[in-house]
């Protein structure tokens, strides 16, 4: 067991019991502290900061178990949303993304880190096969960032050409909603990925109401046999959008 300023690697002080396997924080100055971070003798608590690199390490350890990993992820998100630790948490997550960490990519979206959009776009654009998981998580993160991630819309559409990432790209665009509709309509008209564009528009429901004219056109006459799947997807998308408009008439206006 390694030592770190009087603490064991799991975050408890050496020689004192530690009741969990997850380090919530790393104490900046652990001299005279108990495992809860209180000064012995009733003095004020020290300042603490999240140990993001280690939390990511624990989350990436499949042997840690699902509950532990879920708990760790919650701690990362909490640190990213806390104004007092947000800046350094985002910096640590962005650094981890550059080193290929997929959990860090997803977390950046979950905490609304718009300053990391370019980092996430770079991951999505990557064609490295060993980064497939990270590319999927980065796409999802961009979806969580919503309209703020509009500069990434074309990157996500381009991801349709890679079967292993296309689904995540489509889900991200569906999460973005109305802001992504014009680019998807353009893809539906003349792009190479008409099928997934139609399916994505259908997932948006009423938010894609402006795409109805083009979808209805594609749902019409089948001019070529290879258009049949696009025809079916467009027809289903029209049904989904119209149904959602009835249920939510104000959505997407």
Image (spheres, rainbow, N blue to C red):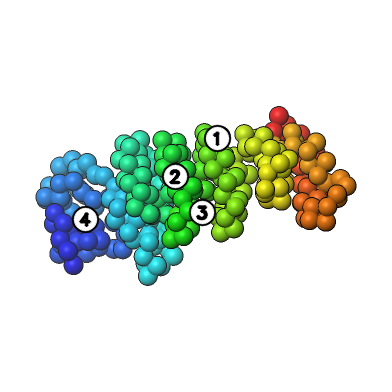
What residue did someone put label 3 on?
Answer: 136
CA gap between label 1 and label 4 equals 45 Å
Q: What element carries label 1?
A: helix
Q: Can residue 13 be seen in this view?
A: no
Contact (CB < 8 A) between labels 3 and 1? no
Residue at 12 percent across and 47 percent down: it is: 41
CA gap between label 2 and label 4 equals 40 Å
CA gap between label 2 and label 3 equals 12 Å
Residue at 31 percent across and 50 percent down: it is: 52
Q: What element carries label 2?
A: helix
Query: Which circle's residue, 2 or 4, is located before the other in the chain?
Result: 4
Query: In which quadrant is the C terminus drawn?
Result: top right
Q: Which residue lies furthest to the top in this view?
A: 253
| Number of the front mark, 4 or 3 | 3
What residue did someone put label 4 on?
Answer: 35
- Mark 2: few/some/many CA within 10 Å (<14, 14-19, 20+): some
Q: Can residue 31 be seen in this view?
A: yes
Residue at 49 percent across and 48 percent down: it is: 124
């Amino acid at each position: 067991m390694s030592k770190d300023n009087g603490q064991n690697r799991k975050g408890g002080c050496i020689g004192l019991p530690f009741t969990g396997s997850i380090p919530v924080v790393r104490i900046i100055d652990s001299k005279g502290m108990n495992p809860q971070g209180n000064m012995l003798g009733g003095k004020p608590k020290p300042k603490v900061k999240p140990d993001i690199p280690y939390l990511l390490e624990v989350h990436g350890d499949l042997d840690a178990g699902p509950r532990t990993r879920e708990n760790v992820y919650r701690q990362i998100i909490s640190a990213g949303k806390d104004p007092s630790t947000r800046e350094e948490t985002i910096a640590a997550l962005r650094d981890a993304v550059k080193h290929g960490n997929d959990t860090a990519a997803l977390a950046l979206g979950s905490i609304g880190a718009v300053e990391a959009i370019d980092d996430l776009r770079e991951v999505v654009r990557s064609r490295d096969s060993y980064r497939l998981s990270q590319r999927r998580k980065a796409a999802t993160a961009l979806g969580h960032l919503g309209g703020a991630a509009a500069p990434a819309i074309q990157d996500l559409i381009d991801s349709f050409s890679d079967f292993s990432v296309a689904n995540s790209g489509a889900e991200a665009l569906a999460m973005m909603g109305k802001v992504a509709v014009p680019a998807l309509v353009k893809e539906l008209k003349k792009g190479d990925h008409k099928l997934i564009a139609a399916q994505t528009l259908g997932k948006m429901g009423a938010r894609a109401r402006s795409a109805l004219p083009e979808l209805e056109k594609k749902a019409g006459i089948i001019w070529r046999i290879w258009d049949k799947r696009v025809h079916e997807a467009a027809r289903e998308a029209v049904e989904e959008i119209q149904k959602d408009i009835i249920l939510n008439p104000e959505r997407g206006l």
